[in-house]
Amino acid sequence: MAELVVLKLGGSVLTDKKKALTANKKVIARLAKEVGEVINSAQVRVVVVHGAGSFGHILAKKYGLQGGVHDASQRIGFAETHAAVTELSQLIAREFAKNNVPAIPVYPLLTARQQNKKLVSFNHQVVKDLLFAGLTPIVPGDVVLDGALAGSICSGDASAPWLARALEAKRMVFGVDVEGVCTTDPKKDRKAVLIPEITSKNINQVLASLGGSSAPDVTGGMRGKIMELAEQAKATPITIVNALKPGRVRDALLGKQVTGTRVLF
Ligand code: IPE
């Protein structure tokens, strides 16, 4: 059977993060074409996890959902946020269909549970069955039920590694809006250098090379992110690529050598 890859597309790639409910339609159409080429080559099966971008974060902030769902207004916000997320997933699914990919949204709200903002279960059987039927599951970042907080936000960054592990995916591809993991934040620092590979051999060196004394926050943030990626990569190797550059997501899905960061443990 064709190997399985979990693709996570960031919300900042798919949407204009500053404008509420605004999709980057051209980028979505191009990515649908790239993923379509890969899936229809029959070499690879893909589970697509996508961020919510401006279909999620703006509403979640407006209603203060980061701290849970505690009153009637927040329950409205919870419902509104889920509705917005489903709109983005449907929009992506329609673009995929135009490229001969029968994509079906699977909402974490209905299949996953969290405890204090931490993902504790994801019924991956439905994802598995969709793949078996030759369909392509699309899993958004979503609001979900939370045993401690009634509701909380489940990021695609949590569901992607969960599904990759549960479905024994061959690798994960993270499509982001920068070249990959860099020594400092490339959006703020022109001297940021791309780290092409992170393995058990160089991780200590990579962590030591991060940032400078003038940027302790950036360093702390990057350090945490790299440690998390390393942990995830123990189960599933990761390739992080710039999804705004045509062809990178396609090549990474196919397992080709591509500009980005490979995390292998
Ligand atoms: C966020 O999902 C979900 C909501 C705010 C409802 P992600 O964390 O996966 O989204 P991005 O990639 O940051 O936009």
Image (cartoon, grey):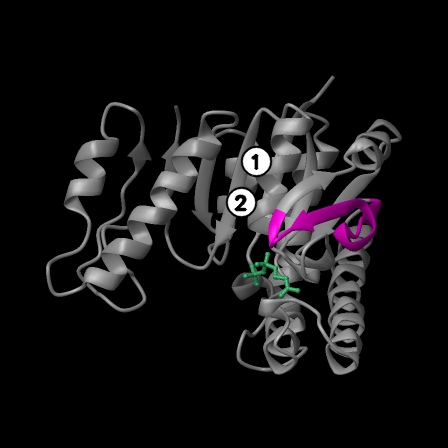
In terms of image quarters, where does ligand 1 lie? bottom right
The magenta segment? 102-118
**Above or below 178: residue 19:** below
Residue 115: say if magenta. yes
Dot 1 falls on a residue whose secondary structure is: helix
Residue 2 percent coordinates (x, y): 70, 21
Q: Which amino acid, mark 1?
A: Leu
Q: Which amino acid, mark 2?
A: Val
Q: Residues within 10 Å of mark 1 (few under 14, many from 20)?
A: many
Task: Say left or right for 178 vs 122.
Answer: left
| Image-quadrant location for residue 16 | bottom right
Task: Please name the residue that numbered disc 2 is placed on.
Answer: 249
Task: Please name the residue that numbered disc 1 is placed on.
Answer: 253
Residue 257 percent coordinates (x, y): 41, 31
- Front in this rendered view, residue 42 or 89: 89
Task: Measure the C-alpha gap from mark 1 to mark 2.
Answer: 6 Å
Q: Residues within 10 Å of mark 2 (few under 14, many from 20)?
A: many
